[in-house]
Amino acid sequence: MPKKTVVGEYQGSKIIVENTWFGGAKLFHNNDLVATNNDFFAVKKSVPLMSGIITINGVEHLIQVFGYALITVKLQIKINGEYLAGDRF
């Protein structure tokens, strides 16, 4: 089963998104699970698949994962509305 992984770093913290066909998508902050999504389809790349609040050095940050899948899966991580990692779309 294919797995797509996107990794980003923000202020020394590791942000990871993993997506598998049957396991859905998972968002991790320093190996702690932040959010999951088990939707089978993702066709609106302007609507987040997952979002959560993470705390880095006592400051809260909004993290969002956007994605869509037609032929291949495209994933993008944004933090506080700014691109962090993944596909650009």
Image: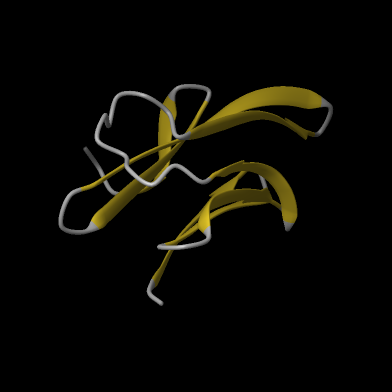
The residue shown at (45%, 22%) is 81
The residue shown at (77%, 24%) is 59
Q: Nearer the viewer, residue 35 or 54?
A: 35
Q: In the picture, which quadrant includes the N terminus?
A: bottom left
* Colouring scheme, one of rainbow, by chain, secondary structure, one colour: secondary structure
The residue shown at (26%, 29%) is 44
Q: Position of residue 32 (x, y in %)?
A: 76, 52
Q: Nearer the viewer, residue 78 or 42?
A: 42
Q: Nearer the viewer, residue 19 or 57?
A: 19
Dividing the picture into quadrants, the one containing residue 54 is top right
> How many labels, in total?
0
Residue 32 is left or right of residue 65, and the answer is right
Residue 82 is left or right of residue 26, and the answer is left
Residue 86 is left or right of residue 23, and the answer is left
Q: Position of residue 66 (x, y in %)?
A: 38, 36
Dividing the picture into quadrants, the one containing residue 20 is bottom left
The residue shown at (73%, 23%) is 60
Q: Residue furthest bottom?
A: 1
| 38 lies above or below 1 | above
Q: Position of residue 19 (x, y in %)?
A: 46, 58
Dividing the picture into quadrants, the one containing residue 89 is top left
| 40 lies above or below 89 | below
